[in-house]
Image: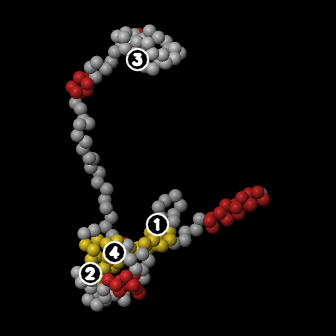
Amino acid sequence: MALGLTGGLFVLSGCSFIENSPMPRGSLIEADDYNQLKPGVSNRADALDLLGSPTSKATFDDNTWIYVSMMTAPTPANFPHVTKQQVVVLNFDQAGTLRSLRTLGPKDAKHPGMVGDKTPTPGTKINILQEIIGNVGRYNPMQGMMNNSSFGGGNNGMGMSNGPGHGGAGNSLP
């Protein structure tokens, strides 16, 4: 009884080690910070002062800055669960003045779907005629009978060596 109670307390005490504490990821920015930026008034230097360096810039447009932040909580034997996610997109004009500021949340996310199609691989499909013709000459019922040696090597009946076996004779040259 005491052993069972001690074991139960030990198991329950181990649960405190697996605590679901939230973990911040990305550029942690608050609404108070990016609400200070005003389109038409603020510039890139203001954005850097308030928000820091962007998480990413648009691939073909250095005037679009993207800040990504999320809070995750670990889940046992699985990927972390996203509890809060926010994306702030800043668009600047060529002079560096802020044109627009957008905030995106989980409801704005577009989840990619998996495509069930198969990628065709040319040259891997063969018909029955190619299979029959391709196997001609591969099967030789007399192959096992042509070995004269019991050591794994020897000649195959045509004077050619079958393998590296030499029956303990060593590596000697003729």
Q: Amino acid at mark 1?
A: His
Q: Which residue is mark 3?
A: 162
For image coordinates 27% across by 47% down, the residue present is 118
Is residue 152 toward the left or the right of residue 129 in the image? Answer: right
* Residue 70, x across and y down, in percent: 43, 72
Tell me the CA gap for discs 2 and 1: 33 Å
Find residue 102 and report its horizontal and vertical position in percent.
31, 80
- Residue identifier under label 4: 66
Query: Percent position (x, y) of residue 66?
Result: 33, 75
The amino acid on which the numbered mark 4 sits, given as a three-letter code, is: Ile
Tell me where residue 1 appears, x and y as whole percent. 77, 57
Looking at the image, is mark 4 or mark 2 earlier in the sequence?
Answer: 4
In depth, the one of 80 and 28 nearer the eye is 28
Q: Which residue matches tag 1?
A: 81
Q: Residues within 10 Å of mark 1 (few under 14, many from 20)?
A: few
Question: What secondary structure is found at the residue carrying circle 1?
Answer: strand
**Structural distance between the alpha carbons of marks 3 and 1:** 61 Å
Q: Nearer the viewer, mark 2 or mark 1?
A: 2
Q: Earlier in the sequence, mark 1 or mark 4?
A: 4
Q: Nearer the viewer, residue 33 or 73?
A: 33
Task: Identify whether 128 is placed above or below 95.
Answer: above
Marker disc for residue 92: 2
For mark 2, give the secondary structure: strand
Q: Is residue 16 left or right of residue 38?
A: right
